[in-house]
Amino acid sequence: MGGIFRKLLRHVVEATIVFLLIVFLPGLPPPFEFSELRVTPPMPLEGPLAVNGDLNRGEHLFEGKIKGPESLEVYKGEIYSGIHGGEIVKFVNDEVVPVVKFGKPCGGFIEEAVCGRPLGLKFDSKGYLFVADAYYGIFQVDVNKRAFTQLVSMDEPINGKKAKFPNGIDVASDGMVYWSDSSAVVDLQNGGFSVFGDRSGRLLRYNPKTKQNEVLVDNLYLANGVSLSSEENYVLVAETMASRIIRYHLKGPKKGQTDVFLDGLPGAPDNIKRTENDGFFIALTAHRAPGGFNVLEFLGMHPILQKFFARMFMLIELPFAFIDSVIPNFYTKKIVHMIGSFETVADVVPSSARIVEVDKLGNVIGSLHCTDGSLKHISEVLYHDRTYYLASPYNEYLGRVKTRIPIHIKKPASSALPGGVKGS
C-alpha cells in the first residue's frame, strides 16, 4: 500500500508542477487577457420558448455536395451561401452553382486558411452581395458578373489591431458596412482556443466613402452575427460565448452607447436574421439547459483554468504546426486543424437546432425547435417561400423544413417573454 501511495503522490506532484508551469510561465501562447465572466442563466423553456417540433423532419438538400453553408441570402429568388473550400455558391433547382472564390487553390478543409472561408453574407438594396471571409477580409460581389472587390484587407490595422476573424455582416441603406471581428488574437482555424477566455472580439463599421473602419464595440467574447434594425437606429451583434445579444445605438438620445439587447439565451447565439415583422431570428448553435452544467461557462468563472486549457492545447498544437512548416504533409495539417477547430469544440458541447424570435424591443415572441435529431448545429435560418432553410458551419447539407405559417403569426405577441438585462 505504501508503494502505491508514494507512486500516486509522485504523479500528483508532477501534475501540479506541470499545471503551475503552464499557468505561470510568461510568454506562452495564446496572448489572451484572461478574466472572469459569469454568464446569465438560461431562460426557462416555457411560454414562447416552449419546446416544439416545428423543425422536425428536416430535409437534407445537396447532401455530400457541400460542407458548411454557414449563412444564407436570397436574390432574385435564388439562395446564396458560402461553403468550405472558399466559394460563394447559389442553389438553382438541384444544382450547386459556383459564383466566386476569394481564396487560393487548396487541399480541402484542412487548408481552409488558404482556401478562404466565407461566413456572413448580406445583399444591399442595389443587388451587391457583401461577404465576410474569415481569412481574406470584407468583399463586395457583383453576382451577375461574378466579380468581386476587396473592401477590407486582413493586413490593415484597425485601432492598432489587425482583424483576425471576420464573421458577421450587414449593410445600411447609406452604404455603411457593419461587421464583426470575432477575435483580434486567433483566426478561425484556431478559433477553438477563443472559447477559453478570448475577449478581443469587435463590432466594426466600414465607411465606403473614406474606406476607413472604426471600432464601435470592443472586448466581446466571440463577436458573431450582425444585424441592423429595420429603422437602422441600432445594430445588433451576437456575443456567442456570453449567450447574449449586444446593441449599439446609431440614432436617438443613446447614439454611440452600447447596452445588452437580450441576455440569458438558452444556447450560444450565432447569426441574426431580420424578420418580416421587423424583429429578429436568432440561431442558437449550441444548447444550454436551465440548471444544467456547462463546462465552458464553468471555465469562464475561473480564469486560471481558462489559461491552463488554452495554453495546454496550444502547446500540443505547436510541434505539429512546426513540423508542417518544415515538411508540409496531410497528417500534420489535419492534426493542427482538429486541435484548433470549432468543429472539435462543437463535438463536445450539446448541439442545437433551435431558433429564437424576438421583436424589435428584445422580447422573445416565439421559437422553433428540432426534437427528432434530423437537424443540428444550426447557425442561421432563412424564411423564404413558406420554407425554413437552415444553415450550419459544419453540416454537409442545407437543411429545409416546409411550413404553411411563419413563426411570428403562430406565436401571439401577448405571450412574449421580456428581453434581457438592459444597459444604460
Image (cartoon, helix red, strand yellow):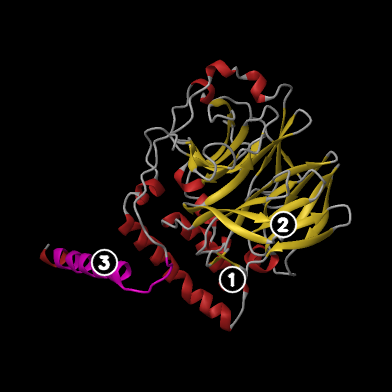
Residue 228, picture quadrant:
top right
Coordinates of residue 187 in the picture (x, y in percent) = 56, 63
Residue, disc 2: 208
Between the residue at mark 1 and the residue at mark 2, the CA separation in whole angstroms equals 37 Å
Task: From the viewer's perspective, tell me whether residue 285 is left or right of residue 103.
Answer: left
Coordinates of residue 64 in the picture (x, y in percent) = 73, 51
Q: Camera-side residue: 93 or 215?
A: 215
Quadrant containing the N terminus in the rendered view = bottom left
Residue segment shown in magenta: 5-31
Between the residue at mark 2 and the residue at mark 3, the CA separation in whole angstroms equals 54 Å
Q: What kind of residue is marked 1?
A: Lys
Task: From the viewer's perspective, tell me whether residue 279 is left or right of residue 416.
Answer: right
Q: What kind of residue is marked 3?
A: Ala
Q: Camera-side residue: 141 or 16?
A: 141
Coordinates of residue 34 in the picture (x, y in percent) = 37, 59
Q: Please report contact status of discs 3 and 1: CB closer than 8 Å, yes or no.
A: no
Coordinates of residue 42 in the picture (x, y in percent) = 43, 34
* Mark linked to residue 333: 1
Is-magenta flag for residue 17? yes
User: Badge 1: how crowded within 10 Å, few (<14), some, or many (20+)?
Assistant: some
Is-magenta flag for residue 88? no
Element under disc 1: helix
